[in-house]
Image (spheres, rainbow, N blue to C red):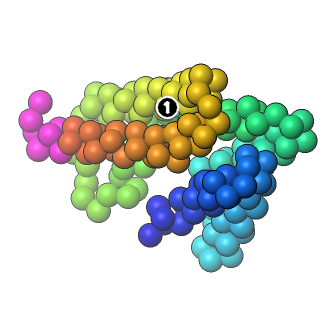
Amino acid sequence: MQAVVDFLPLLAFAVAYWLGDMHTAIATIMVAISLQVLITWLVKRKVSRMLLASAVLVVVLGGISLSLNNDLIFKWKPTVLNWIVAAVFLGSRYVGDRTIAQRILESVSKDECKLSQTDWRRLNLMWVAFFLISGAANIFVAYRFSEPVWVNFKLFGLTGMTLVFAVIQGLWLSKRSTGET
């Protein structure tokens, strides 16, 4: 259910774009993600760091983009967020006793994840590579293709890439956790 709620600001952005223009879409997602943060806080009394980082980037880059009348600034948001997350994942190899990938999976998994430290580091590096590639793909599409193509890529392409990667990761984890190598 949370994944659906997290998707709503992006959906509002796309609908506003399809019915209006990029400026309307940027303003819409700025309001929608701000409301999402507020409602999440009121309901749960906490907001995830990822949502907060995304909201700050949407509002800051969206505001700059609207004030300078330069939509390209806003198009950098997915790239900046993905590259920041990649840096955090990479840095987690060197800070603390567990990587971010291990912390996240152990916090959401009811079953204990049985992986070696080498496999946890590999998994973490897979996520680093994914976030770097996603960020690069976003900026490539933003500069090389038309605005409607970028909007559709942001909505369907990046989401699809994430889902495909999650399935691949799940298969890899399944193979590793059963003792196969």
Going by the picture, which residue comes out furthest to the right? Answer: 67
Magenta includes 179?
yes
Q: Position of residue 95 (x, y in %)?
A: 52, 31
- Residue 176 appearing in the image: yes
Q: How many marks?
A: 1
Pick the quarter of the image with the N terminus. Answer: bottom left
| Residue nearest the viewer, comparing 134 with 151 | 151
Q: Position of residue 7 (x, y in %)?
A: 53, 59
Apparent side of residue 138 relative to residue 105 in the rendered image (left or right): right
Residue that numbered label 1 is attached to: 134
Q: Which residue type does callout 1 highlight? A: Ser
| Residue nearest the viewer, comparing 117 with 163 | 163
Going by the picture, which residue comes out furthest to the bottom? Answer: 43
Magenta includes 1?
no
- Residue 87 appearing in the image: no
Which corner quadrant of the image does residue 11 belong to?
A: bottom right
Going by the picture, which residue comes out furthest to the front? Answer: 19
Q: Position of residue 71 (x, y in %)?
A: 76, 36
140 shown above or below 12: above
Q: What residue lies at 53% left-to-right and 43% top-to-bottom?
A: 152
Q: What residue lies at 36% left-to-right and 46% top-to-bottom?
A: 163
Apparent side of residue 31 relative to residue 85 in the rendered image (left or right): right
Q: Position of residue 140 (x, y in %)?
A: 56, 23
Pick the quarter of the image with the C terminus. Answer: top left
Apparent side of residue 138 relative to residue 157 in the rendered image (left or right): right
| SS under mark 1 | helix
Please provide the residue range marked out in magenta: 173-181
Q: What residue lies at 62% left-to-right and 59% top-to-bottom?
A: 15
Which corner quadrant of the image does residue 24 belong to?
A: bottom right
